Image (spheres, rainbow, N blue to C red):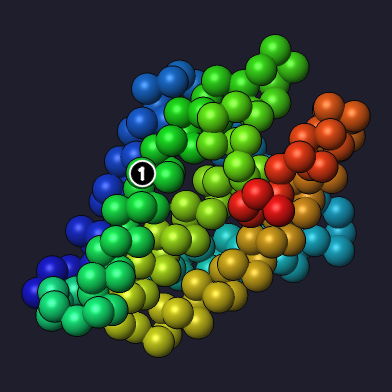
């Protein structure tokens, strides 16, 4: 039996440790929340609360490696998520001259970091076999979509036609 906290630690090491390697500017870029309008405020709070709930709840769950298909799928997604998160952070930390990240993995997804978060959290669901955690992750993902919409609106305002062209080339989550 392994406590869920040990599933979370690598996420934080990559998310903050690797990110800090690129300096304060990179940390600020990732931590920055685009301005939200008043219709998005409830989604923002649901996002924050569900994020905290996922980490706190997962930390106290148990993980048993039982050699089931769900466990193997969970391990595969866990590894994939951390690789994707690492690549996303590295690519995001090196924006182009106007401050837009469009190279590397950002050629395939406008939001690979959020995608990696979801895959990672889904792996925790599979590894802990927790229905409650699955429900929280679904709530998180729905609220995350609203956050992404607000970020896209902000990027359109800040980067204009360059971001509009980027949106036409690259899908919100993956390719389309």
Q: Residue at x 25, y 79 (%)?
A: 69
Residue 61 in view, yes or no: no
Which residue ends up furthest to the left in the rendered image?
A: 1
x then y, percent, for residue 146: 73, 61
Quadrant in which residue 161 is drawn: top right
Q: Quick check: 159 above or below 60?
A: above
Residue 113 in view, yes or no: yes
Given residues 146 and 118, the one toward you in this image is: 118
> How many numbered marks, from 0 up?
1
Given residues 62 and 77, the one toward you in this image is: 77
x then y, percent, for residue 130: 34, 83
Q: Residue at x 36, y 75 (%)?
A: 125
Q: Residue at x 62, y 45 (%)?
A: 109
For disc 1, the marked residue is 83
Quadrant in which residue 72 is drawn: bottom left
Residue 88 lies left or right of residue 58; in this view the side is right
Q: Quick check: 171 above or below 144?
A: above
**The N terminus lies in quadrant:** bottom left
Quadrant in which residue 48 is drawn: bottom right
Given residues 137 and 77, the one toward you in this image is: 77
Which residue ends up furthest to the bottom in the rendered image?
A: 131
x then y, percent, for residue 17: 33, 33
Which residue ends up furthest to the top in the rendered image?
A: 97
At numbered mark 1, what does the secondary structure look like: helix, strand or loop? helix
x then y, percent, for residue 4: 24, 67
Residue 121 lies left or right of residue 9; in this view the side is right
Q: Residue at x 55, y 46 (%)?
A: 112
* Residue neighbourhood size for the residue with mark 1, other residues' Cα within 10 Å, grouped as few (<14), some (14–19), many (≥20): few
């Amino acid at each position: 039996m392994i406590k869920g906290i040990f599933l979370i630690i690598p996420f934080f090491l990559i998310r903050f440790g690797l990110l800090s390697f690129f300096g304060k500017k990179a940390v600020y870029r990732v931590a920055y929340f685009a301005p939200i309008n008043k219709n998005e405020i409830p989604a923002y709070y649901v996002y924050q609360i569900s994020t905290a709930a996922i980490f706190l709840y997962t930390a106290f769950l148990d993980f048993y490696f039982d050699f089931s298909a769900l466990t193997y799928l969970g391990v595969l997604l866990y590894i994939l998520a951390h690789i994707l998160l690492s690549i996303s952070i590295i690519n995001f930390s090196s924006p182009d001259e106007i401050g837009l990240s469009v190279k590397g993995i950002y050629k395939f997804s406008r939001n690979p970091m959020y995608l990696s978060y979801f895959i990672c959290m889904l792996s925790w669901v599979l590894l802990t076999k927790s229905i409650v955690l699955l429900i929280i992750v679904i709530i998180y993902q729905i609220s995350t979509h609203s956050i992404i919409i607000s970020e896209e609106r902000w990027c359109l305002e800040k980067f204009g036609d360059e971001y509009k062209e980027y949106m036409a080339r690259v899908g919100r989550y993956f390719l389309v």
